[in-house]
Structures are given as structure tokens and as C-alpha cells.
Amino acid sequence: MKTARMLLSFVLMFCFMTPAYAAAPVKEKSPVNLEHLDFLNEDVTIDGKDMLITHIYSEYPDYKWVDASGEGIACVDDVARAAVVYLNDYEQNKNAQSLESAKKALNFVMHMQADDGEFYNFVNKDLSINTDGPTSKKSFDWWAARAMWSLGQGYGVFKDVDPAYAKELKDSFLLANKALQKKVNEHYGEYKNVHGYKIPAWIGGFDAMSNALLGLAEFYEVEPRADVKDSMKKVGRGLDEFQYGSYTQYPYGAHMDWEGSPTLWHAYGSGQTYALAKAGMVLGEKKWIASAKQEAEQFFTHLLVTGMIKEMAPTMAKDEQIAYGVNMLTQGFAEVYHATKDPKYAKYAGLTASWFTGNNDAGAVMYDPATGRGYDGLNGVNGKVNWNSGAESTIEALMAMQTVNEIPLAAKLLDAKTVDRHTAVVEEAESFESVLGKPEIVTPESSWTGDASYSGKLMKLGNQDEVSKKIAIDKSGAYLLSSALVREAGNTGELEAKIDGRTVTAASVKPSPDSDFLTLVNFDRPFYLNKGTHDLQVSFEGRSVLADNLVLQPVVESAVFKSSGQTLKLERNLLTGINYLK
């Protein structure tokens, strides 16, 4: 496999070095390099059938294969996604070797399917199936949803080039769809109520099921069957409905990921916008496209201004940024572009993918087109980089590159660098000083609450307690204030904010409709601040409240990017809901 590609590369290089080709126009080199993914793969034969497995880890500095201790040496989670990369490469470049690699990968995916349509995930060193591991046992979980994605896309590709093999893929896909139907129909139309939020009960892992919706859309696009459409309608409805917020209201139009929490969003795996835009185009569901556009416009562009994050719960965390999260935003923007034809979303996709070329908090190149390695992540707080290059990081980086490379407006911005940003500032509550009463700093036993995460210590404010802090404002303008705090059952009150002794805004703290929970509460009105240093004073009236932090947000936030000699400014007005990229 690798030898064939190296030989082809040598032949092409030799041709372009000869005088006959010297004056010929040369197409800009593609950033997509499958070399490292090829290296991670191993050809195997199981039950007499040729297959491909993708080794999970590859560690710096020699990048040899490393097994996943206690799990196995390869899994559907990675091999299914590798199949998608190879299918993409065949569709884009008609690379026969990629088609063969995709077929072997899909053979492995089908091998891991049980008789009821569900899937196991891992194989052991002896290539036997790990049937009882918690991340491998038979189920319709992440790996099954990813399997459906690869099978659906595989069917669309092989239907024309190898109809007999396409029939195998179709049978496997439809069997998986039966398992999906069983999962969805058990609670279809029912809802869970968590902290006053109505959550569709029939999905169970909204991020994971976005992969299943992608597979359904890929299949239905080439063979519109009623049973597949039924699954699309049910899964799409669930993903669409688990979306909350606006430009100013948390979680800012994001599609949430886990049915157990309406306040936790994580970047990795959040493919709902990608899937809804894709499926919306296939079925003509304008509501799904609008839902995808809402997240892209209200939340994803906010992340372009703030810089990439790991999660928000409700405070944005910038540590542990990974390729998987960045690719989900890239795919979301790109698919909204395809659905709306609005060129700004293509540009947003390119700006997002520039994270891979060094436009990130560590200033590190996270995908190397010379080797094809996608690196395993960075910490946006301390700037440290994980230079390992495992399957997931490499595959997700390649997917982003494949997508951007096919959209000229996006590809032109792949080298962008953020040179300026004006966005929210988080002031930790424990950093404020006591002014009145006896406010108390509280250290939680754990940062995890059960459905959200504290960003640090807490400040407990009792009735008429007041705290203050000097804050530096680098740009005059209108600002909004919000606070990450605990809403308690049966407890109410009001926070009041003063700037330099003048009351400017207030927030009503309403009781939780069920158990105590951490969320973000908005103060009621914007206020103007001049550039310079100000005294922010916050007081509370009521029994007590636990505050995690205060967020000072410009009404008009912006980021400036430079790319290939041009300068672009993304400006977002949170009150008018208007974004400009100019």
C-alpha cells in the first residue's frame, strides 16, 4: 500500500522535473497526505476475508504502534472513520488504492456486527472480538453510529463501482438500521425534564447519534427507502430539539450533547450541525438547516472570536483541545455553506481549520502535511502540546483537510492567524475582595457537579454581602454581565452590579425547578464602560448564593485574522444578532 503510493509520488516528481513540464501550470499542493494513516493500518485476514485494522496509538518520537491497554489493538470507532477518509479520497481523486483500503476497512466494520444489527468495538491482539469490555460490548453506541456512517457512505460509493459488494454493505446497513429503530422507538415522543429543560428521551447520546444521521443521509441520498427516512425523521427531530439559547442566552444556540445535562457542551463529537445540515438538504427539511445555521451563526462564530475550547459547562475551558473538536466545527460550517450557499460559512470553515496550521493557543502546527500526522492535542492554558499522533487525531485532521481542500474560499484561509481579539473576560468569584458582610470562599469537593463543572473555587454571598474587584477595560463600549452560579431549589434572590459606585445592572436568581444546578445567569441590561480601570462591585439580596465567576462580555466582540496578505475582521453584535466578516 505505502510502496505503491511512494512509487507513484516518485514518478510524478520525476515528470515535473523534466523540461517538457517546466512551463506547465502547477496546481497548488493538496494538504491531504494519507501516509501516516496508511502506516497506522495493518492488513489482516479474519475468517478468510481480507480486512484492514487501524492501530489506535502512535507515540512521539518514533511514532510506532502502541496498543490500547485493556481494550485491544483496533476498534470500529477508528476503522469506520478511516473508511470515511478513504471513501472521501476516492470520491475526490478517484484513487483506486483508497477504494481498496476503504473496502478492507468496511469488511472489518461488518465483521464486528452482531446478528441483531448492533456492534462490538475492539479486537484483541489475536484478532478475537472483545465482547465484554465497557467500551467494546455489543450495543448501539458510538461505534455502531460510526459504523452506520461508514456503511452508508460506502454503499453510495460502491453502488456504481462494485454492485455485488454494495449489496453486502446495504444488508449490513439495513440490519444496523433495525437496531437503531429498536433503540429510538423504545421512547420515541417521550421527554425527560432536567432543571426545567425538556430533553428528547429517545436519542440517548446526541453527539453519537449525529454519526448515525450522517450515515442515514448518505444512504438515503442514493436509495430513498421509507424505513431509512423514518429513522432520519426521528433522529433528526431529536437532535434539532436539544438546542437552546441565543446570541446572549446560554448556551448560545448550541446543540447539547448528553441527555443528562442541559448545561454541558463539549467540542469533541459534536457533529449535530454537520448532520442536520446534511440530512436537511437530503430530505428538504428546512427546519433542520435553520437549526444547523443557528448553532453555526450564534455559537461557532463566538468560538472563532474567543479561540477554540474543550468544553463549556457553563464556563468555557481552553485546555485539552483536540483535532476531533476542531473538525466538528469545520464540518459544521462547511455543511451549512453547502446548504445555504452563503460564502461566509465557507470562510468560517477555513478560519476554523487554521487551528491545524498553527492558529491556536499554543501556536503549534497540529497537522503536518509532509508526514500526514495529526497530533493528539494541546493545552490552551499552558501552551503544552501532545506530539503523539494516534488514529483519531490523524483521521479527524485528514477529514478537515479533505473538506477545506474542496472549497476554494475555505482553502484560501487555511494559513490564517488571529492577530487581535476583543471578547469576554472571566473574573473568578474567589478573586473578589470583601466589602460588606461576611462573604465566604468555598472549595468544592470536586469540580464536577454531576452535570456541569466549576471553573474554580466559589464565593458564597449571604444577604446584603458585597464584594469588589478592579477590572481593566481595553476598549470603550457597551458590555453585558453574567454569572456562573448555583440555582438552588426553593431559593431566590437578586445580584446587583455597580461600576465605580454606580448601579448599572442586576440579575434575578430564580429557584431551581428540581435539584440544585450550576448555570449561567444574565444580568438584565447592558452598560457602557470607558477604556481604563474600573471598580466592579457585586452585592446580593436574599438568603445566599454560590457564585463561580462573573463574565464581562462586550456587546460587540471581534477578531482580526491575517491570511496570505489579506486582513479579515469578524465582528459580532450580540444585541442585534448581526455578524460581519469583512
Image: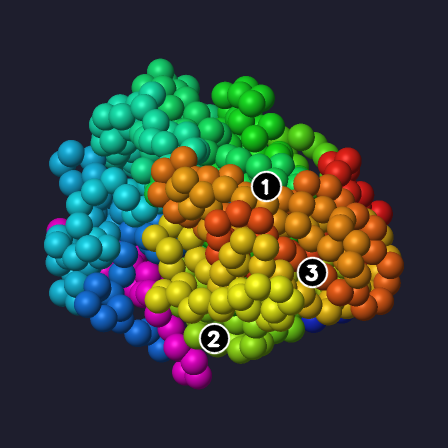
Pointer 2 residue: 386
Tell whether position 47 is magenta: yes
Tell whether position 35 is magenta: no
Residue type at mark 3: give it.
Answer: Gln
- Taking 82 as reference, is 570 left or right? right
Dot 2 or dot 1: first in sequence order is 2
How far across and down, in percent of the image, does residue 32 sit?
56, 59
- Taking 288 as reference, is 360 left or right? right
Residue at x 68% of width, y 41% of height: 524
Pointer 1 residue: 508
Dot 3 or dot 2: first in sequence order is 2
- Between label 3 and label 2, give the one nearer the viewer: 3
Residue at x 78% of width, y 59% of height: 501
- Taking 182 as reference, is 36 left or right? right
How far across and down, in percent of the image, does residue 68 sit?
26, 68
Quarter where residue 64 is shown: bottom left
Above or below 143: residue 72: below
